[in-house]
């Protein structure tokens, strides 16, 4: 569940950094506006982070809390996100550079259903034609201590024939499929990509690193399995990957429990082997850095996180950085930004 990072301002204030490459445009392809059940991340909250010095020209709200909206469901979340986007744009009136937080939105519908096309039209209307993808979380594990996806996916969702039929309907609408699965499920994501080669598939969260339940303290032990799965997934040319979401509590590294938040050097030094392998496997033109805020905000501030990404990408060319921080996301989701 999301937690607003503003809950611990003194804790985050311990790490202050100058912004690296402040003029480089960034399109953040993964964050969540939240509301309900005591969890809120609204327009002013996000603007406070965007104002930390990086040139965030746009962002993509990704579904995560449709179940909070009684009677509104997925469409209710879309309308909420669009409204928060409008508020945030209004708050920036008069500025030279404006971040559009709903340059695109990723919604939810059960792709196994028989009325996918009609549901997509309703979602697109609720999103005011900003719908660019659908996410059905497939995250599932046999260990009850490992949380399954928030939409309660069954085992084997990605290889379900009815689900794959829904993916084909997404492709016909020029909408992407955002996939959150655990690294152990990447073979199923490969099977999906091969079964529906016309679909544009986005593998979220660096392939689903998890460090709770039976995976607790096992990240180094399973690195080779993750590495091999990522390399094989990269052979599917219709798949791109989001790089991030490894500071959230689900990843199991425990940064949020320390006396001091992560700094960009520490983050980059620790995670570079994971990030650089993914970039090597996919190529910068099929990779995009993601904030996953506010979820990753339990361990690191927004500005420091983007500094960390820039450190990880430090050896890449100007053109390669353009893909990693902006162009891949804009191209994948068909956004003119």
Image: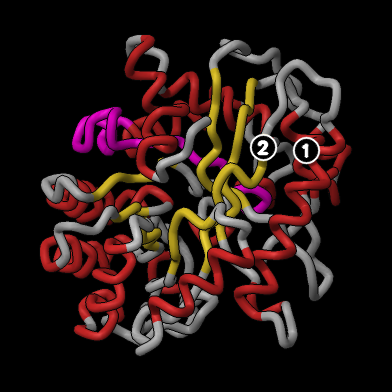
Residue found 19% across the figure and 84% down from its top: 161
Residue sitting nearer the eye, 286 or 302: 286
> In the rendered view, would you say 37 is above or below 331?
below
Residue 5 rendering spot, x and y as whole percentages: 77, 48
- Would you name the residue on which mark 1 appears? 89
Residue 6 rendering spot, x and y as whole percentages: 83, 46
Residue found 70% across the figure and 65% down from its top: 79
Q: Is residue 218 visible?
A: no
Please say which color scheme the image uses: secondary structure
> In the rendered view, would you say 136 is above or below 263?
below
Residue found 18% across the figure and 57% down from its top: 198
Of the numbered discs in the image, which one, if any, rests on residue 37?
none
Of the numbered discs in the image, which one, if any, rests on residue 100?
2
Numbered range of the magenta stretch: 276-296
Q: Does the magenta stretch include residue 292?
A: yes
237 horizontally vs 9: left or right: left
Q: What element carries label 1?
A: helix
Q: Is mark 2 on a helix, strand or loop?
A: strand
Residue found 37% across the figure and 48% down from its top: 206
Residue 44, quarter of the rendered image: top right
> In the rendered view, would you say 336 is above or below 8?
above
Q: Are marks 1 and 2 in contact (CB under 8 Å)?
A: yes
Residue sitting nearer the eye, 9 or 81: 81
Q: How far apart are marks 1 and 2 (CA)?
A: 6 Å
């Amino acid at each position: 569940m999301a937690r607003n990072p503003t809950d611990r301002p003194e804790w985050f204030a311990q790490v202050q950094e100058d912004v690296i490459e402040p003029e480089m445009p960034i399109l953040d392809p993964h964050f969540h506006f939240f509301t309900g059940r005591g969890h809120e991340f609204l327009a002013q909250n996000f603007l406070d982070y965007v104002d930390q010095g990086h040139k965030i020209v746009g962002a993509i709200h990704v579904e995560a809390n449709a179940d909070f909206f009684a009677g509104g469901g997925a469409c209710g979340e879309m309308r909420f996100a669009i409204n928060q986007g409008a508020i945030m744009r209004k708050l920036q009136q008069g500025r030279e550079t404006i971040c559009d937080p709903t340059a695109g939105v990723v919604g939810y519908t059960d792709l196994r259903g028989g009325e996918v096309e009609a549901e997509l039209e309703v979602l697109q209307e609720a999103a005011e034609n900003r719908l660019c993808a659908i996410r059905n979380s497939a995250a599932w594990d046999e260990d009850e201590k490992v949380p399954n996806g928030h939409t309660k996916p069954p085992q084997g969702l990605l290889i379900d024939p009815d689900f794959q039929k829904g993916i084909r309907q997404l492709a016909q609408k020029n909408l992407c499929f955002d996939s959150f699965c655990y690294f152990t499920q990447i073979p199923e994501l490969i099977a999906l990509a091969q079964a529906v080669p016309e679909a544009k598939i986005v593998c979220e969260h660096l392939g689903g690193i998890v460090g709770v339940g039976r995976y607790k303290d096992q990240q180094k032990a399973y690195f080779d399995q993750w590495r091999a799965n990522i390399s094989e997934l990269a052979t599917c040319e219709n798949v791109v990957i989001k790089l991030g979401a490894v500071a959230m509590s689900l990843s199991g590294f425990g940064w949020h429990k320390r006396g001091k938040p992560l700094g960009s050097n520490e983050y980059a030094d620790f995670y570079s082997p994971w990030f650089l392998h993914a970039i090597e496997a996919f190529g910068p033109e099929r990779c995009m850095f993601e904030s996953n805020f506010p979820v990753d905000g339990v361990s690191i501030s927004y500005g420091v996180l983007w500094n960390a990404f820039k450190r990880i990408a430090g050896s890449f060319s100007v053109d390669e950085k353009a893909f990693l921080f902006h162009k891949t996301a804009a191209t994948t989701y068909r956004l003119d930004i």
